[in-house]
Image (tube, rainbow, N blue to C red):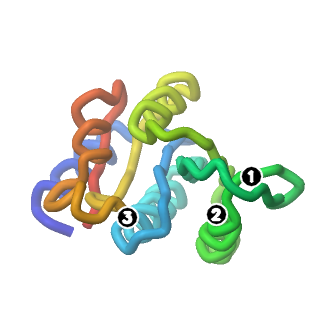
Amino acid sequence: MDARTQFDLLILIARARENMKILIPYDGSTHSKNAALEAIDLAKKYSGSLTLLNVHWDPGATGKYDGTEIRDQPVIKLFEDLENDLKKSGVSYELRYESDANAPQVILNVSKEGGYDAIIMGCRGLGGARAWLLGSVSTRIAAEALCPVIIVK
C-alpha cells in the first residue's frame, strides 16, 4: 500500500463507525482482489458489511449463480474465487452483478442508492491499454463518488 492509500485509509478509519457499508467494485484483477482483502479487514474491525459489485457487459450466453440469472459465465468463477475468503472472514456480504456497458456510472449509482459509507477498489482493472497508470474507472469514481474512496494497488 502506498503512502497516499495509507493516508486515505487512516481518514476512513477515523470516520469509521460500527456497521459501516462498504462497496467493492470487483472484476477479478489482482488490484481488485487486493482491494477486496483490504475491505474484508476493515469490515471485520468495524462490524461492517460488504457488497461486491461486478459490472460487465456481454449480451451473450446466460447463466445462473446461486439461483440468480446472470449474463456472463466468468462472473460465476469470479465470485466463487473470492467467496471462500469472504466466508472465512465471517463478515456479512452480498454478491451483486450488473450488466451494463457503463461500469463507472453503475458503480456511482449503486453507491448513492445504497447509502454506502465507502468504496474500496483496485487502481486498475482488466481494462487493458485503455486504463494505464490509474484506471479510467477508478479515476472517475474517485472524482464523482459522494462517499470516501480508497484505491488499492
Distance, label 2 to label 3, CA atoms, is 13 Å
User: Which residue is found at the position 19% from the left and 56% from the top?
Assistant: 5
Does 122 sit left or right of 53 as displayed?
Answer: left
* Residue 111 appears in the rendering: yes
Mark 3 is surrounded, within 10 Å at the Cα level, by few (under 14), some (14 to 19) or many (20 or more) other residues, namely some
Q: Nearer the viewer, residue 128 or 136?
A: 128
User: Which residue is found at the position 54% from the left and 31% from the top?
Assistant: 110
User: Which three-letter amino acid code belongs to the residue tagged 3?
Assistant: Leu
Q: Which residue is mark 3?
A: 126
User: Which three-letter amino acid code belongs to the residue tagged 1?
Assistant: Ile
From the top left corner, tell me how far across and down residue 98 is, in percent: 62, 42
Q: Nearer the viewer, residue 75 or 13?
A: 75
- Dot placed on the residue nearer the N-terminal end, 2 or 3: 2
Q: Which residue is mark 1?
A: 70
Which quadrant of the figure has residue 11?
top left
**Quadrant location, the N terminus:** bottom left
Q: Residue furthest front?
A: 60
* CB within 8 Å, label 1 to label 2: yes
- Dot placed on the residue nearer the N-terminal end, 1 or 3: 1
Q: Residue furthest right?
A: 67
Distance, label 1 to label 2, CA atoms, is 8 Å
Q: Which residue is mark 2?
A: 75
Q: Secondary structure at mark 3?
A: loop
Tally of numbered discs = 3
* CB within 8 Å, label 2 to label 3: no
